[in-house]
Image (cartoon, grey):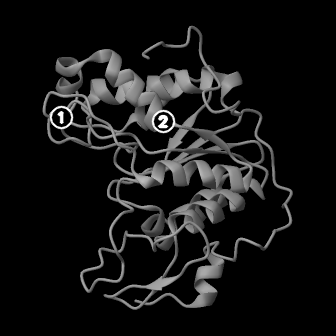
Amino acid sequence: MQLSWSTLLTAGLATISVQATPVEVARRATPTVYLAGDSTMARTSGAHMGWGEYLPKYINLPVVNKAISGRSARSYTNEGRFAEIERLIQRDDIVIIEFGHNDGGSPNSANDNGRSACGGTGDEVCRSGKTGELVYTFNKYIENAARSFLNKGARVIISSQTPNNPWEGGVFSQSPPRFVGYAGLAAQRTGASFVDHFWACINMYRRLGNQKTNSLFPQDHTHTNHEGADLVAQAFVQAVARDFNGTTPLKQYLKQPVPTVW
């Protein structure tokens, strides 16, 4: 079903040039951390698990994992999931946004999967070849979500996606997808904090080596097992502790000692 322009505006897709006025909302005694992402962050079943489920081991704050398997910035927006977090957050809460694994491809195809973003990093717009809906860029979806949270007084961390297994095939190789850079750009444009989770994990996998890294990916090259999810969470926390990409609002809430995995 094609979304109307008014519906998209409600979902937070006003043009980037529009600056909303911050809204005064309640403040919790202790901030809550909300997670928005895909299966690499989400609670899943079976042999693999998302890293968001292990984040509470390493921070002194409650964590609400709203990551959902198979989602992209576009589908997460269209399903109203960013809007749901916006309704839940209170002043000083922290929202971590991490997408990229499901955002590639072209929405112009008749086989549009409902996840692919329009090409570019700005106000570019295209149409779904399947539904005719207006499709925006990855940055448009991420930046509008980030601004909606910031306008309610929350703190936002935009995180780059986790890497696929860099030791697949037995030879170390890494090539960051374009969404890694797009995430950093989104943080810069919105004033959100940035954590380059991709490179933190790459550093960790390089240190772990071929055999150990491959043992963490039992099903495919994207999804880790429970041990791997724990390590990916540790890589994120270590990046926060070291100000890998600048100071984030999460740093003051890290449990000690902070893990060192890279």
Residue 197 - label: 2
What amino acid type is highlighted by mark number 2?
His
The answer to whether any part of residue 66 appears in the image is no
Mark 1 sits on what residue?
Answer: 168
Q: In the depicted view, which residue is nearer to us: 16 or 227?
A: 16
Image spot of residue 236 (x, y percent): 50, 29
Q: Nearer the viewer, residue 150 or 136?
A: 136
Say which quarter of the image contains residue 254.
Answer: top right
In the picture, which quadrant includes the C terminus?
top left
Residue 155 image offset from top left, x and y in percent = 72, 44
Q: Residue at x 40, y 89 (%)?
A: 1
Distance between the alpha carbons at the discs numbered 2 and 1:
19 Å
Residue shown at the point (70%, 62%) measured from the top left = 148
Mark 2 or mark 1, earlier in chain: 1
Identify the residue at image location x=21%, y=18%. 212
Q: Residue at x 62, y 55 (%)?
A: 186
Q: Secondary structure at mark 1?
A: loop
Instruction: Determine whether, in the image, residue 56 is placed left or right of residue 228.
Output: right
Q: Position of residue 19 (x, y in %)?
A: 81, 68
Classed neighbour count for the residue bearing mark 2: other residues with Cα under 10 Å, few (<14), some (14–19), many (≥20): many
Q: Position of residue 213 (x, y in %)?
A: 24, 24
